[in-house]
Image: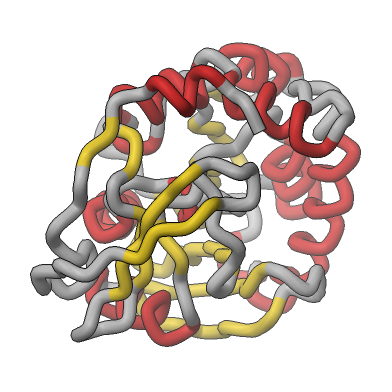
Amino acid sequence: MKFKFCEDAPVETIWTCNLCGSSVSRFIGQKDRYGFPVSWAKCPECGLMFLSPRMTPESYREFYEARHYRKLLTEFHGKPYTAMSIEAEQAHYADRLSDWIRPHMGPITGGTALDLGGSTGVVLDRLVHDYNLDGTVVEPAGSEAERARDRGLAVAQVPLESYDSGGNHYDLILLCQTIDHLLDIKGSLAKIRGWMAPVGLFFVDFVENGPLKIDHPYYLSKTTMKRYVDEAGFVVKVMEPSGDGLHVNVLCGVA
């Protein structure tokens, strides 16, 4: 696949494991699912897999905010991936998530919710209505953030790494189909932990050892995911396959 932005973007080599801090020196090169040449490393200490080299933080930010990511998906799948076209998929996802999380929502119904990387707000809007929540979406892409605003949701048009809660703490925080895209999982989870209410819930899902993709800097397993959330100060309540054959759902409380 020819995609000039990804071919020309500056890259950086990652020498240290984000999870355990071990030094990594063995890299294996191959092509990702889009056909881009990439290389990945597997930490010999904790087993975390990650891309290295990978695009720089500035390149990844432009990749998402300037909609290069959606253009790449459009070219790969042969169908449009725009803010509006993805909403049907998000609606199905919202249905599944609302049903899945329902047994745990009693204590926080009527509380506050934060959806990190919340796209057009379809998922959070469903939960807001199902559980009487006051919701905020964090989404860097302009067209998707605007769709979330149209739903009446509060929106912070910034990446997760730049979000400032202003001292607010949330009863429910969502990180839906996003953690694999982060550049610093450990640092991001520490921030999320700081935004949690004392009896809050944190939902995250991940692709378990999924296919290599230039947009997925990390490749998580149940073991590495559990270590990440444990070390961030969460306790896992539920970890199980999502039902879509790809993701694993994780629901955490505060340790």
Residue lying at 11% horizontally and 73% vertically, measured from the top left: 22
Residue 114 on image: x %, y %: 51, 43
Quarter assignment of residue 248: bottom right
Q: Nearer the viewer, residue 63 or 160?
A: 63
**Residue 4 horizontal side relative to residue 184, left or right:** right
Residue lying at 20% horizontally and 52% vertically, measured from the top left: 14
Vertical comparison of 182 with 2: above or below: below
Residue 186 on image: x %, y %: 25, 60
Residue lying at 71% horizontally and 33% vertically, measured from the top left: 73
Q: Nearer the viewer, residue 220 or 248?
A: 220
Residue 184 on image: x %, y %: 28, 50
**Residue 226 horizontal side relative to residue 171, left or right:** left
* Residue 235 seen from this side: yes
Quarter assignment of residue 12: top left
Considering the image in quadrants, where does the N terminus appear? top right
Residue 30 on image: x %, y %: 47, 58
Quarter assignment of residue 131: bottom right
Considering the image in quadrants, where does the C terminus appear? bottom left
Residue lying at 71% horizontally and 69% vertically, measured from the top left: 246
